[in-house]
Amino acid sequence: MSDYRRCYVPGGCYFFTVVTHRRRALFGSPDRVQLLRQAMRAVQRARPFTIQAMVVLPDHLHAVWQLPEDDADFSRRWRDIKRGFSSQLDAPVNHRGEKAIWQRRFWEHLIRDEDDWRRHVDYVHYNPVKHGLVERPAQWPYSSFHAAVRKGWYPLHWGAAEPEDIRGWRLE
């Protein structure tokens, strides 16, 4: 059994990687991405958090969240998002009664400072290019990249080449 311990910090900012079961391409259609968005919005209404950056690829997603000052429970939020999304799909059920839709766990990283935040936000937005899905982040439809451009975080043409600050990163 793993000795892994999660770092829960009230009001923390976190980077997440969440992967589908056996890397199945669940998010290959706009309808599936919309179901995920609906599940996330429902959880945000019940247990608020702010999505600072996010990208949904066919078999995984990355996100940067800011939690409320008095709350550190990102695990419950991910459990509820996964459950809400999964309830909309037909899928085989394992011996635990779980649908084979998501990997059981997810990976998180507590953002330590502004440079760490920038690198992780860059990683999120560059990820579709890294995976060979598009040539520039602006071409990927399931990303917060365009919202980040509107906020002035990036020029629209950003990411045609791998950013130096994330070169060689593998956070999947």
Image: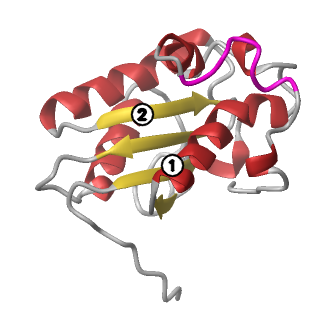
Q: Residue, x 83% and y 51% (percent of image)?
A: 167
What residue is shown with label 1? 117
Looking at the rendering, the stretch of residues picked out in magenta corresponds to 153-160
* x 67%, y 15%: residue: 155
Q: Are marks 2 and 1 in contact (CB under 8 Å)?
A: yes
What's the mark number on residue 17? none
> Hey, what amino acid is under mark 2?
Gln
Q: Nearer the viewer, mark 2 or mark 1?
A: 1
Where residue 9 sits: x, y (%)? 26, 66
Q: Position of residue 123 (x, y in %)?
A: 67, 42
Residue found at x 64% / y 12%: 141
Between 127 and 104, which is closer to the camera in this rendering? 127
Amino acid type, label 1: Trp
Is residue 38 in view? Answer: yes
Tell me the SS state at disc 1: helix
Could you classify mark 1 by the number of other residues whose Cα lies within 10 Å: few (under 14), some (14-19), or many (20 or more)? some
- Residue 38: horizontal and vertical position, in percent? 35, 20
